[in-house]
Image: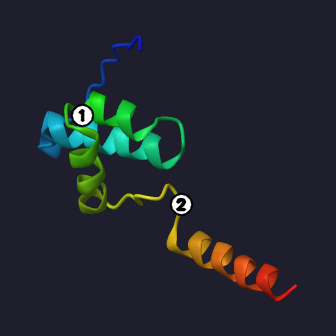
Amino acid sequence: MPMENITITIPASTQTDPFELKMLVAGGLYEKGKLTAGQAAEIVGLSKRAFIEMLGKYGFSVFGYTADEAIDDFSDLVEWRRL
């Protein structure tokens, strides 16, 4: 897959290391459905499995949606099963 390089300038006072910044960007794009887990893992430089394991540490959902959305989906499924 072709990649594009993007330069981001942030204040040194944030003390954000490059891995953390890559994880935040890749995790956010993965969670929004703009990247697959494999694509996001490639950006960060991890295996897909390692990337997925790291998502929770950075506050991202492994499933690509929030707990509230999961509860709504489950409620819809329960309602559908009653029909």
Looking at the image, residue 1 sits to the left or right of residue 19; the answer is: right
Say what secondary structure mark 2 lies in.
loop
As displayed, is residue 68 above or below residue 4? below
Which mark is drawn over residue 77? none
Q: Closest to the observer: 72 or 24?
A: 72
Q: Closest to the observer: 78 or 31?
A: 78
Write the residue at 33% across / 14% down.
Answer: 5
Write the residue at 50% across / 55% down.
Answer: 64
Q: Report the Cα–Cα distance between label 1 and label 2.
A: 21 Å
Write the residue at 20% across / 35% down.
Answer: 11
Residue named by callout 1: 44
Q: Quadrant of the N terminus?
A: top left
Q: Quadrant of the C terminus?
A: bottom right
- Tag 1: amino acid: Val
Residue named by callout 2: 65
As displayed, is residue 61 above or below residue 71? above
- Tag 2: amino acid: Tyr
Write the residue at 39% across / 13% down.
Answer: 4
Q: Closest to the observer: 20 or 68?
A: 68
